[in-house]
Image (spheres, rainbow, N blue to C red):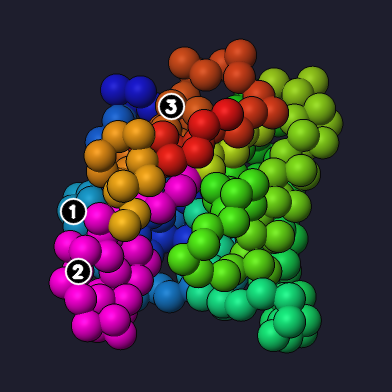
Amino acid sequence: MLLQGKTVVVSGVGAGLGRQVAATVVRDGGNAVLGARTEATLAACAAELDPKGEHTAYLATDITDETQCEALAALAVERFGAVDAVVHVAAWDSYFGGLEDADFATWQGVLDVNLLGTLRMTRACLPALKERGGSVVLIGTQSAVAAPSQVRQAAYAASKGALTSAMYSLARELGPHRIRVNTVLPGWMWGPPVQAYVTFAAHTEKVPEDEVLARLTDRMALPELATDGDVAEAVAFLASDRARAITGQSLLVNAGELMH
């Protein structure tokens, strides 16, 4: 029970990684406080993971709104008495393209969600985290350090790269309060977004989905993609006391596609 008695705020709870993180928190004995923009999604997730409602709470939250971030943090304290960890899954990852076709107004929106939104949510939780220390786990991306050849997501990669850089400053600033700050960097991760990519590419190219998937797995040291669940397991470790001496670090969860 890695997170026994811990209260973890999870942003961006939807059908993919956010849900898996929440499920892992509850499975490992913790309380999961769920945030996302769509209340119906949160309600369905909470009901599925915790039918009795003893270990979950949720609130519709847009992380571009500081007041809503503060309300989610307040809910965690009101319901469970503390915040022990914050996991930042919420992100804008659906804008594709590079420099030549860039719409910089959209880039600003991506940065507002992925960089500033994450910092807003972190700051909202700071008063509670300072009470007894804890963990902030950022979700980055491998594409911030090694751009994939299959798709272009320059704005997403740049925003997540900035977030990883911010991690170093946060780790120094918050360390005296025994607050740890780390980043998980997923690569190609089997879950709803990558499933959609495989289906789209197979349809567009008129090839079997297995062929598209093989192009990805052939790049890995392990002959498979990491899953949303694999990434959630790494998040749970970094949120737990077992990682009490780890801060300012980035952990690749990518089946060995890129090695540092």
The secondary structure making up most of the magenta span is: helix
Where the N terminus falls, by quadrant? top left
Task: Please tell me how crowded label 3 is: few (under 14), some (14-19), or many (20+) other residues with Cα within 10 Å.
Answer: some
Q: Residue at x 77, y 34 (%)?
A: 168
Question: Alpha-carbon distance for marks 2 and 3?
Answer: 33 Å
Q: Earlier in the sequence, mark 2 or mark 3?
A: 2
Residue 36: x, y in percent?
48, 66
Where the C terminus falls, by quadrant? top right
Q: Which residue is drawn at 69% across and 28% down?
A: 248
User: Which residue is under mark 1?
Assistant: 51
Q: In this view, does 191 lie above or below 129?
A: below
Q: In this view, does 228 lie above or below 65?
A: above
Identity of the amino acid at label 1? Pro
- Magenta range is 186-214
Q: Earlier in the sequence, mark 3 or mark 1?
A: 1
Q: Which of the two discs, 2 and 3, sits closer to the camera?
A: 2
Q: Which of 257 and 62 is in front in this view?
A: 257
Q: Which mark is residue 209?
A: 2
Whether residue 256 sits left or right of residue 49 in the image: it is: right
Q: Residue 125 carries which label?
A: none
Instruction: Assign a secondary structure to mark 3.
Output: helix
State whether residue 215 appears in this view.
Answer: yes
Instruction: Assign a secondary structure to mark 2.
Output: helix
Q: Which image quadrant for residue 257?
A: top left
Q: Which of the two discs, 3 and 1, sits closer to the camera?
A: 3
Q: Which image quadrant for residue 193?
A: bottom left
Question: Alpha-carbon distance for marks 3 and 1?
Answer: 25 Å
Identity of the amino acid at label 2? Glu
